[in-house]
């Protein structure tokens, strides 16, 4: 009986360590990359119509807890809070003032609705509102 109990405790410990490692591994993957938007939920306008020339980009700065990038034409920065898989953004500050159409408005509004994130098996970054994918990003190699 004692062996079974020790085995069960060891098995649970290994499981808990592996879950913690996966969660922290996912978190570290968002840093050091620029992420280009490839999907946003909600608008009735086609994605290509919202962002005909350039796609929004986000980059996370771990030491300053800020996200920076472009909305497709204007630069922005926003403080964020991250705890495990939970993430939230403060109001993004626009750093330039060009008119960008509906795409910028939708992108910035959607950022404020984000509550969680996850990394997909194919290396995409998904920003979610609870369990609903609101935005999906791919690594941007051109930046």
Image: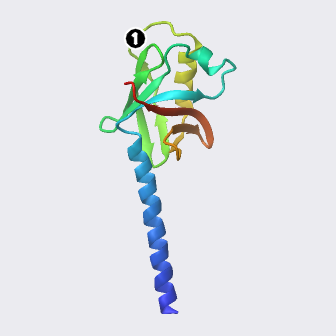
33 is higher (above) or lower (below) than 21: above
Q: How many badges with numbers are in the image?
A: 1
Q: Is residue 38 visible?
A: yes
Q: As rendered, which of 33 and 105 lies closer to the eye? A: 33
Q: Quadrant of the C terminus?
A: top left
Q: Residue at x 63, y 29 (%)?
A: 41
Q: As rendered, which of 55 and 113 lies closer to the eye? A: 55
**Colouring used for the render:** rainbow
Q: Residue at x 45, y 77 (%)?
A: 10
Q: Element under label 1?
A: loop
Residue 36 percent location from the top left of the image? 47, 28
Q: Is residue 77 visible?
A: no
Horizontal side, residue 79 vs residue 123: left or right = left
95 is higher (above) or lower (below) than 24: above
Q: Residues within 10 Å of mark 1 (few under 14, many from 20)?
A: few
Which residue is label 1 attached to? 96
25 is higher (above) or lower (below) than 13: above
């Amino acid at each position: 009986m004692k062996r079974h109990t020790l085995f069960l405790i060891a098995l649970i410990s290994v499981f808990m360590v592996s879950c913690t490692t996966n969660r922290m591994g996912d978190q570290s993957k968002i840093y050091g990359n620029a992420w280009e938007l490839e999907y946003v939920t909600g608008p009735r306008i086609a994605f290509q119509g919202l962002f005909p020339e350039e796609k929004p980009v986000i980059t996370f700065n771990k030491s300053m807890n800020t996200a920076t990038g472009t909305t497709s034409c204007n630069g922005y920065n926003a403080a964020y809070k991250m705890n495990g898989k939970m993430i939230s953004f403060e109001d993004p500050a626009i750093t330039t003032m060009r008119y960008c159409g509906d795409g910028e408005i939708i992108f910035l509004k959607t950022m404020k609705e984000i509550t969680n994130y996850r990394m997909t098996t194919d290396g995409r970054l998904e920003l979610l509102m609870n369990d609903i994918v609101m935005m999906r990003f791919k690594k941007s190699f051109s930046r």
